[in-house]
Amino acid sequence: MDKDGSKIIFSGIQPSGTITLGNYIGAVRNWPLTAKMGRGIFSVADLHALTVRNKPSELRARTLSTFAILLASGVDPENSIVFVQSHVPAHAELAWVLNCYTMFGELGRMTQFKDKSKQHSENVNAGLFTYPALMAADILLYDTDLVPVGVDQKQHVELARDIALRFNGVYGDVFTIPEGYIPSFGAKICSLTRPDKKMSKSDPNPKSYISIVEDADTIIKKFKSAVTDSDGRIAFSPEKAGISNLLTIYSTMTGCTVEEAVSEFEGSGYGDFKLAVGKAVAEGLRPLREKYEDLMNNKDYLVSVMEQGAARAAKIADRTLARVYKKIGLFKG
Ligand code: TYM
C-alpha cells in the first residue's frame, strides 16, 4: 500500500528474448490497466535473465528494446515507475536476505525450475534455482498489493507470499503480503506450432511465437501456418487446443467474447479463420509497433526515463531494505 492508501501494483519481465504475444496478452497489456487501480511499478528484470547464458551485447540491446516495448504498450512513466532492475541495487541485496528465508524444498518444487533445468541441462546454475527469491525481493521491496502476471508465474508469486509471511512471523509486520493478479482469460497463450505448450520467447522455433514488434506480413504468415486439428469445426474446447488458442487470441485482440468469435466464424474454413486471426493481431499491434519504432529512434529519451524511474524506485526500495536490515540485526554504527 502506498502512503496515501492507494494500491501498489508491481510486475516485471525478463529481457531474455523477443517479447511475445503471450507476454503481451497474459501480462504487459494489463499493466497500464491495473496501474489505474493505484500506483504501478514495472521493471525490466535483467538480473533474472542472467540465469541463462547471454551474449552481453544482445542482453544490453534487449534491455533497451524491452523497456521501449513497455512504454509502447501504454505504461505511462509519469504516473507509473518504470525502471531496469539492475539499476536499483536493493533488489540484489534483499534477494540475498530472502534466500536465507527460502527453503530448499520450496525452490525444488517450482515447476519452472524443473522445466528450465531440463531445457538447459548443461547449465543448471544456483541462480536458476534461487530465482524465485529474487522475484520475491522485487515484489516485497515496494509493499506491493497486486502482481499482474500470466499463469506460469503464479507459483512464484505464491512463494513470495509464503516468504513474506514467514519473515513477518519472525519480525512482525515488515512486508505487505502480495497477491497475484491473473487475468481470467488469456493468462496462458499457447505456441502456434505446439498448442499444448505455452508460447515462449525461448522456443527455438520462431514459427511458434509472435514477436509483438514484427511486421504485419510475418505475423499473418505465422498464423496461416498455425497448427490446428483435422475435424474442421471452429469451437472452444480442451480437445481443440489449437483452435481454442486462436479463438482466445482473436477475442483478446478484438475485444469480443469467445462466443461472439465462434458465431462470427461459424461455417468458415480453418484457412479463412487463421487469416482473420493473423490480420486482427497484425492490426491490433500496429499502434504499439509504430510507437516502439519511434521510441527506438530516441534512445536519449529512453535512457532519461530509465534514469528517472530508477531514482524513484530506489527511494522506495532503499527504505524497505533499511527496515529489513534493522529488523534482522545488521549493525549500523
Ligand atoms: P517472463 O519474462 O517469463 O514473462 C513476463 C510475463 O509474461 C507472462 N507470460 C505469459 N502469459 C500468457 N501466456 C504466455 N504464453 C506467457 N508467457 C509469459 C508471464 O507470466 C509474466 O507475467 N520472473 C518473471 C519476471 C519477473 C517478475 C518479477 C514478475 C521478475 N520479477 C516480479 C512479477 C513480479 C518472468 O520471468 O516473466
Image (cartoon, rainbow, N blue to C red):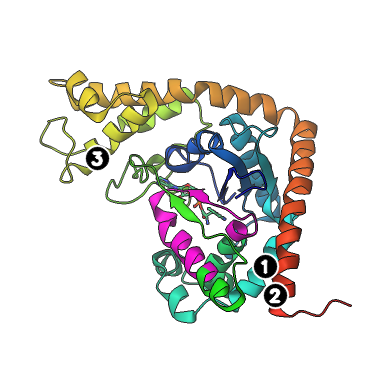
Report the Cα–Cα distance between label 1 and label 2: 13 Å
**Mark 2 Cα shell of 10 Å, populated few (<14), some (14-19), many (≥20):** few
Q: Which residue is mark 1?
A: 94
Q: In the rendered structure, are the residues bearing label 1 and label 3 in contact, judged by CB atoms less than 8 Å apart? A: no
Which amino acid is tagged 1? Answer: Leu
Would you say the residues marked 1 and 2 are in contact, meaning their CB atoms lie under 8 Å apart?
no
Ligand 1 under 8 Å from disc 1 Cβ: no
Left or right of 158 in this view: 90: right
Alpha-carbon span between mark 1 and mark 3: 42 Å
Vertical comparison of 203 with 100: above or below? above
Q: Position of residue 168 (x, y in %)?
A: 56, 71
Provide residue 32's location: percent of width, then percent of height.
55, 34
The residue nearer to you, when weighing 57 against 213, is 213
Residue 247: in sight, yes or no? yes
Mark 2 beta carbon near ligand 1 (under 8 Å): no
What's the residue type where badge 2 is placed? Lys
The local secondary structure at tag 3 comes to helix
Decide which of tag 1 and tag 2 comes sooner along the chain.
Answer: 1
Residue 143 vertical position relative to residue 184 in the rendered view, above or below: below
Identify the residue at image location x=47%, y=52%.
202
For label 2, the residue is 327
- Front of the two marks 2 and 3: 2
Q: In this orientation, which residue lies closer to the viewer: 107 or 117?
A: 107
| Mark-to-mark CA distance, 2 and 3 | 51 Å
Spot the residue most to the right. Answer: 333
For disc 3, the marked residue is: 242
Residue type at tag 3: Gly
